[in-house]
Image: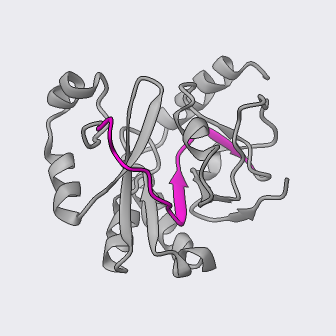
Amino acid sequence: MHNKEALRAHYRRCLRTLTPEYREECGLRLAERLSALPAYSSAQSVSVYISNGPELPTRALIAMVLADGKTLFVPSWQNCHMQMHTCTEQEYMALLAIPREERLRLHGHPIPMPPFQPDCPRVPIDLHIIPGLAFTEDGLRLGHGMGHYDRYLSTDAGLRVGVCYGEQVAGELPEDEHDVRMDVVLTPKDMHYCTK
């Protein structure tokens, strides 16, 4: 199965089979696993996606980043453009409190995120936590097909940490010229340092 759209459909079906209890447990384990990464210990700034639906939950990760006194960034996007915003605990909780219907009205999708700001300054971020539908152990990533992360990360020097359930680790994935590889792929049980 090498067609990216067919692979996306396959992994979306896989994610829908995971129970809420399993997903929450994996989110907790992921935070523990990330805390053992030396690059996390030395990072002063960390970007983390705000999880939605069956994605690997990031609530515990975000709580850890904030408790460790690191600067938290969360993404937002509009059309083809992605940006990172600093986010306090209060701002994060406020984003989660926005009803799904309001998020759909504001952004056209249910993902909690800050409003897109065309003049948002771009600042260096030490470490990025990156979602995906699938990853390989050597750092290939299958995203949702919009290219937001690939475009953003192609000009960013921060460490790229792809996170996923063990069920999302693939033996191989198709690679396009614009695809950006991860430096580390992290699951609730394993850590893979990627070589190019």
Most common secondary structure along the magenta stretch: loop
Q: Position of residue 26 (x, y in %)?
A: 48, 59
Tell whether 175 sits left or right of 67: right
- If the image is split into quadrants, where does the N terminus sit? top right
Q: Position of residue 35 (x, y in %)?
A: 52, 77
Magenta segment: does it hold 57?
A: no
Magenta segment: does it hold 121?
A: yes
Image colouring: one colour
Tell whether 60 sits left or right of 184: left
Residue 159 falls in image quadrant = bottom right
Relative to 82, residue 160 above or below: below
Tell whether 63 sits left or right of 96: right
The residue nearer to you, when weighing 133 against 81, is: 81
Residue at the spot x=47%, y=49% of the render? 56
The residue nearer to you, when weighing 66 against 172, is: 66
Q: Position of residue 78 (x, y in %)?
A: 37, 28
From where the camera sits, is residue 48 visible? yes
Residue at the spot x=53%, y=81% of the render? 41
Q: Position of residue 105 (x, y in %)?
A: 19, 22
| Count of labels in the image | 0
Which range of residues does the magenta coloring cover? 117-136
Residue at the spot x=32%, y=40% of the render? 119
Relative to 41, residue 97 above or below: above
Give the farthest residue toward the right.
Answer: 196
Relative to 130, residue 5 above or below: above
Residue at the spot x=58%, y=36% of the render? 151
The residue nearer to you, when weighing 54 against 36, is: 36
